[in-house]
Image (spheres, helix red, strand yellow):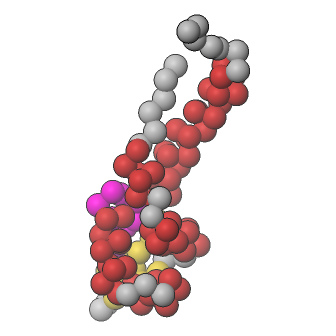
């Protein structure tokens, strides 16, 4: 009963600024200006990180007049949480009891 965690998503979320963006978007949809204000990051740097998160399917962009609002795709993180939960459960149930011989 092996499980596979999406290493690419973990790598993307391992960046402190991307994790901050995801955390902020978990609470509300925000435009780039809001994210610049909240994170202190430069707009071009922030836009690059948002592009990476969009391409990975973690956030979605929604045009609204001359602004673009971003929102977190909950199902992308729910899938990762499920995978990590399965690993934790596997470790709880068989990790201590199972040992390879040397």
The reply to whether residue 64 is visible in this rendering is: no
Residue 52 falls in which quadrant of the image? bottom left
The residue lying toward the viewer, choosing from 98 and 62, is: 98
Position above or below: 89 against 82: above
Position above or below: 7 against 100: below
Q: Position of residue 41 (x, y in %)?
A: 43, 84
Q: Position of residue 18 (x, y in %)?
A: 45, 68
**How many dots with numbers?**
0
Q: Residue at x 48, y 29 (%)?
A: 3
Position above or below: 95 against 55: above
Q: Residue at x 49, y 77 (%)?
A: 29
Q: Quadrant of the C terminus?
A: top right
52 sits to left or right of 74: left
Q: Does 57 lie within the magenta span?
A: yes
Q: Does 67 lie within the magenta span?
A: no
Magenta-drawn segment:
54-61
The reply to whether residue 49 is visible in this rendering is: yes
42 sits to left or right of 82: left
Q: Position of residue 67 (x, y in %)?
A: 34, 88
Q: Position of residue 63 (x, y in %)?
A: 32, 80
Position above or below: 92 against 74: above
Q: Residue at x 59, y 72 (%)?
A: 27
């Amino acid at each position: 009963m092996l499980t596979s965690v999406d290493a690419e998503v973990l790598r993307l979320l391992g960046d402190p600024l991307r994790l901050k963006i995801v955390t902020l978007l978990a609470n509300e949809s925000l435009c780039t200006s809001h994210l610049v204000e909240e994170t202190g990051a430069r707009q071009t740097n922030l836009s690059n990180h948002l592009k990476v998160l969009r391409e990975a399917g973690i956030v979605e962009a929604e045009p609204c007049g001359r602004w673009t609002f971003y929102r977190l795709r909950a199902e992308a993180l729910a899938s990762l949480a499920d995978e990590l939960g399965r690993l934790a459960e596997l470790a709880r149930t068989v990790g201590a009891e199972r040992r390879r011989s040397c």
